Image (cartoon, rainbow, N blue to C red):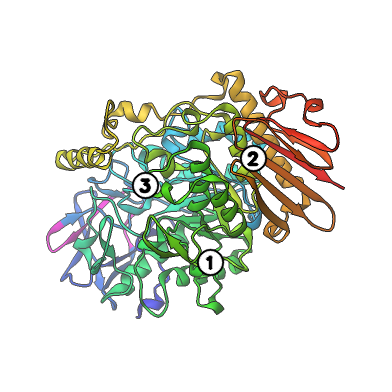
């Protein structure tokens, strides 16, 4: 049997009769591989080809706890579906097919229609579970978003973590509720017309409870990543590693009905082989779409400004559906906050924001002073929806020393301007949880490891990272439960008047975008951004049906421009907590008054 003939998911899979199970373990250097069931019974697996060990019709049932014995050393299953007592305890056999789905009529959402809402399960609600998200789904639907993006849910150590320290890629975090409750959440989202995107990490594994290297050469010394040795996607024995992660992606899409995967830092997936892992992943997804008649998709996080990731196969690309565009965030953030340290030194003023509006990447093959080299590639011919833009996300907020949101950095009026600036861009917009009402709580970095040495290293590393910023303050202790609690969102019943007004503005923007023809399909074809002054930018959408003109005044001073047409809405309006009456915006002789820190929308017949 060859590797390509293995269609079975790694680990323990219950057979359809529910009374027996099959096992598949990749351990190419092992002499013997056994499964220890409920700490008593030992079941030997048979050696197959490609470094695999397998067993069929095994006496394993749902609820059984088990471990894998390699050369007399016992480990949880690296492809475990459930770790009910954490990363250091035995794995559990569960039945992924037990859940009764009700989304048979759901076909998914096309990538060009997405309006994404990123959330962290543990801090989104007071419960900190999948179940805790359910009461908020109707509010999110009313807001207008049509996709939620869950930060990683693969099992990590402890109960508090961003999720990027996962060590069991197939197991759903026990403290969030496990596999069945995630399936239920997805089902409930689909009932409301909301897609679910899952953040997955295929570039590294976390440090605590990571036993993959004991099973086989999952890592390679050929490459280094920020987290150490790279996962082995192209070195000797890489077939087994590729199979492991390709099957992981298939599981989320097939067995959990996840609509799309957001893949963390794909530039750290090192693969110089003839058929890149990401291209193979996309081909598998296309086959699944045909089989399931659904619209599954892949979104990449990448900091290389490289369109190879989204280019079609025929152009030598990996054909991913979209990628995050950090540079839009950087341009918008530098302009509105005045921050110029670090990578923000490459941005600032309306010029770089105009460049990003028109080209997505600011550095698209030009010299970057911060990087001290020519950087990036041209986005010519790329549809706008292939770039996901945002004003905040978990990284840009949580990687600040104090986890400040824009609420703490800019005025209320500027928050509304920022919202419109990216929500009405020609790209795919993504909100970060709490942004829609101006959450005042920070989003901090937190962990709950059990290894004292690892805890100390994380604490020291956080202080080292911010040593140049530590004057009167020190970074919050990531291990402290209080750090986690400070990051929990404010429930809607406790929002103040200003927060409700901001929510109303976001709701208007989202529904306006969804209703207007200029944002249907590839909005980039109809779009042009122009810098009017160092603090004033003009956005124009023009198609056969209508012309839409928007002005973003990023100055603290009012501006006046000549503009015909009907004023559709302004962020400065009284109904959104501003001070401007509609009659005060239209001046004499065809001129229009633009209040300080405002966004104004015109329609020209």
Instruction: Measure how far apart labels 1 and 2 are at the Cα level.
Output: 26 Å
User: Is 338 placed left or right of 450 in the picture?
Assistant: right
Q: Nearer the viewer, mark 1 or mark 3?
A: 3
The residue to which callout 1 is attached is 310
Instruction: Name the secondary structure under disc 1.
Output: loop
Say what secondary structure mark 2 lies in. Answer: helix
Residue 328 location (% of width, % of height): 53, 50
Which tag, 1 or 2, sits closer to the chain's start?
1
Q: Nearer the viewer, residue 10 or 387?
A: 387
| Mark-to-mark CA distance, 2 and 3 | 26 Å
Q: Is residue 60 magenta?
A: yes
| Residue 518 on image: x %, y % | 75, 53
Disc 2: which residue? 420
Residue at horizontal 45 percent and vertical 38 percent from the top:
121
Q: Residue at x 40, y 30 (%)?
A: 487
Residue under label 3: 342
434 w.r.t. 373: above or below: above
């Amino acid at each position: 049997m060859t590797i390509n003939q293995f269609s079975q998911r790694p680990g323990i899979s219950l057979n359809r009769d529910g009374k027996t199970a099959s096992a598949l373990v990749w351990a190419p250097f092992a002499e013997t591989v056994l499964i220890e069931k409920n700490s008593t019974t030992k079941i030997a697996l048979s050696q197959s080809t490609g470094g695999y060990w397998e067993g069929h019709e095994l006496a394993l049932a749902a609820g059984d706890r088990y471990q894998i014995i390699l050369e007399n050393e016992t480990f949880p299953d690296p492809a475990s579906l459930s770790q009910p007592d954490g990363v250091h305890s035995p794995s559990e056999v569960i039945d992924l097919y037990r859940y009764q789905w009700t989304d048979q009529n759901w076909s998914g959402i096309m990538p060009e229609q997405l309006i994404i809402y990123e959330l962290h399960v543990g801090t989104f609600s007071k419960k900190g579970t999948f179940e805790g998200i359910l009461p908020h789904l109707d509010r999110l639907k009313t807001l207008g978003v049509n996709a939620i993006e869950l930060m990683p849910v693969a099992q990590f150590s402890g109960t508090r973590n961003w999720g990027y320290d996962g060590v069991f890629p197939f197991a759903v975090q026990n403290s969030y509720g496990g596999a069945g409750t995630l399936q239920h959440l997805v089902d409930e989202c689909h009932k409301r017309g909301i897609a679910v995107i899952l953040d997955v990490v295929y570039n590294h594994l976390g440090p605590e409870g990571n036993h993959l290297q004991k099973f086989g050469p999952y890592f390679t010394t050929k490459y280094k990543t920020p987290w150490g040795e790279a996962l082995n996607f192209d070195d000797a024995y890489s077939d087994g590693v590729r199979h492991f992660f390709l099957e992981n992606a298939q599981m989320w899409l097939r067995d959990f009905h996840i609509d799309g995967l957001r893949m963390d830092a794909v530039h750290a997936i090192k693969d110089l082989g003839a058929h890149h892992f990401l291209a193979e992943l996309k081909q598998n997804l296309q086959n699944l779409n045909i089989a399931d008649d659904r619209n599954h998709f892949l979104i990449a996080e990448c900091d290389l400004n490289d369109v190879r990731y989204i280019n079609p196969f025929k152009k030598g690309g990996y054909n991913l559906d979209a990628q995050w565009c950090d540079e839009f965030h950087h341009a918008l953030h530098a302009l509105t906050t005045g921050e110029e340290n670090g990578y923000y030194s490459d941005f600032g003023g309306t010029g770089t924001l105009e460049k990003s509006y028109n080209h997505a990447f600011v550095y698209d093959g030009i010299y970057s002073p911060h990087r001290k080299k020519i950087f990036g590639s041209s986005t010519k011919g790329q549809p706008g929806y292939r770039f996901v833009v945002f004003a905040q996300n978990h990284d840009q907020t949580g990687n600040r020393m104090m986890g400040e949101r824009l609420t703490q950095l800019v005025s209320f009026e500027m928050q509304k301007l920022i919202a419109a600036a990216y929500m009405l861009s020609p790209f795919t917009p993504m909100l970060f949880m709490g942004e829609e009402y101006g959450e005042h709580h920070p989003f901090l970095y937190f962990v709950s490891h059990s290894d004292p040495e690892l805890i100390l290293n994380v604490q020291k590393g956080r202080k080292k990272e911010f040593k140049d910023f530590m004057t009167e303050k020190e970074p919050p202790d990531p291990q402290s439960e209080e750090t986690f609690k400070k990051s929990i969102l404010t429930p809607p019943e406790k929002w103040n008047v200003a927060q409700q007004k901001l929510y109303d503005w976001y709701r208007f923007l989202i529904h306006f975008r969804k209703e207007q023809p200029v944002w249907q399909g590839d909005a980039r074809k109809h779009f042009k951004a122009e810098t009017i002054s160092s603090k004033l930018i003009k956005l124009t959408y023009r198609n056969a049906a209508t012309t839409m003109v928007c002005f973003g005044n990023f100055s603290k001073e009012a501006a006046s421009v000549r503009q015909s047409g009907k004023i559709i809405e302004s962020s400065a309006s009284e109904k959104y907590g501003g001070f401007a009456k509609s009659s005060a915006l239209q001046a004499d002789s065809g001129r229009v008054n633009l209040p300080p820190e405002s966004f104004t929308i015109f329609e020209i017949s």
